[in-house]
Amino acid sequence: MPALSEVISALDALWPPERAEGWDAVGTVCGDPDAPVRTVLFAVDPVQEIADEAVRLGADLLVTHHPLYLRGTTTVAASTFKGRVVHTLIRNGVGLHVAHTNADTADPGVSDALAATLELRVLGPLVADPADEAGRRGLGRVCEPPHPMTLAEFAAHAAERLPATAQGVRVAGDPDRPLTRIVVSGGSGDSLFDHVRAAGADAFLTADLRHHPASEATERSPLALLDAAHWATEWPWCTQAAAQLDQISDRHGWGLRTHVSRTVTDPWTAHVASTTDTPAAPRTPAPGPPSGPDSPGAPR
């Protein structure tokens, strides 16, 4: 069995920590470098439910996409929910390693896994890493559909292929519009609209689209938008990452057992559809009693 330090070195070769954004918090959160590793669990979120799953599985290492302490901390006391995660992992001999924005821009990265799940052919990165002479690393992916599809067909395809969440897939645009170029970006992507338009995309599938950026994007061009759950757009990376570690394990003869958590950690748990097709009529205030210090109900 390899030591944790050997496995971490392999993971750092896949997703070098120096390629993470300056604000990010990637790398090893806890774990004994000399501890042997046989079982590794991959997940999106380092929440208590996932920590408990790692313990039940008998995992020696938990690898997550999202950081546990993104904004830093001054305590890991078990009285806090994040501290309880740390205590659960350490008490049961489970290391925690994070690959976040360094995995987003990797080759292959988070958006490659998303494109593969959607059966799209990747043409290249949306925002290329200037340090990559091969031109394959970077943020987001510009893609082609597997065959001619309308927006409605692609939306249905995405809803079927992505893991199920309460949100599903929200869509903005003409449902009959044919799509020949689709951009995907796992996680929050509404800062990328300028790049998406420059890429000549017909549609953009990402997550966490806010009202104003989405509204402005659809007003400026006929770009179609597909907004999926954040967790759903990043979960495919877990399967891809596990397969990458499997290849390394086979090459070194480590015999690692890798698992991908299928626990849905998207925070939204239910969706209630609107019951009317028309907006509510503007409310017209009804005439009321005269206001004044002696009027009924006036504050005193």
Image (tube, helix red, strand yellow):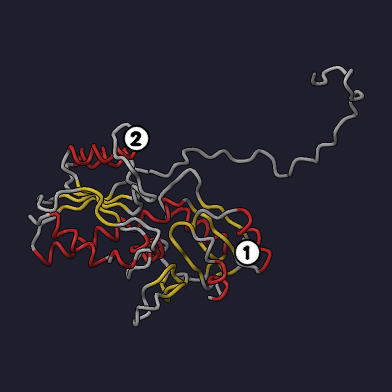
Query: How far across and down, in percent of the image, does residue 74 sit?
Result: 33, 43
Q: Residue at x 55, y 70 (%)?
A: 179
Judge the density around disc 1: few (<14), some (14-19), many (≥20) Cα neighbours within 10 Å: some
Choose the circle earlier in sequence order: 1 or 2: 2
Quickly name the residue at label 1.
217
Q: Are marks 1 and 2 in contact (CB under 8 Å)?
A: no
Q: Quadrant of residue 20?
A: bottom left
The amino acid type of the residue labelled 2 equals Thr
Q: Is residue 111 above or below residue 271?
A: below
Residue 73: give x, y in percent of width and height: 35, 45
Separation of residues labelled 1 and 2 (CA atoms): 40 Å
Judging depth in this view, the residue of 31 and 196 nearest the camera is 31
204 or 61: nearer the eye? 61
Judge from the rendering whether residue 249 lies leftward or rightward of residue 135; answer left or right: left
Q: How many dots with numbers?
A: 2
| Location of residue 137 with respect to 52 vertically, above or below | below
Residue at left offset 63%, top offset 56%: 212
Q: Give the residue type at disc 1.
A: Ala
Residue 18 x/y as whole percent? 30, 67
On screen, residue 27 versus residue 296, left or right, reads: left
Q: Is residue 217 visible?
A: yes
Left or right of 195, for residue 254: left
**Residue at the spot of label 2:** 80
Q: Of circles 1 and 2, which is in front?
A: 2
Q: Residue furthest bottom?
A: 133
Res. 286 image quadrant: top right
Viewer-closest of 252 and 166: 252
Mark 2 closeness class: few <14, some 14–19, many ≥20 residues within 10 Å: few
Determine the residue positioned at 23% across, 50% down.
259
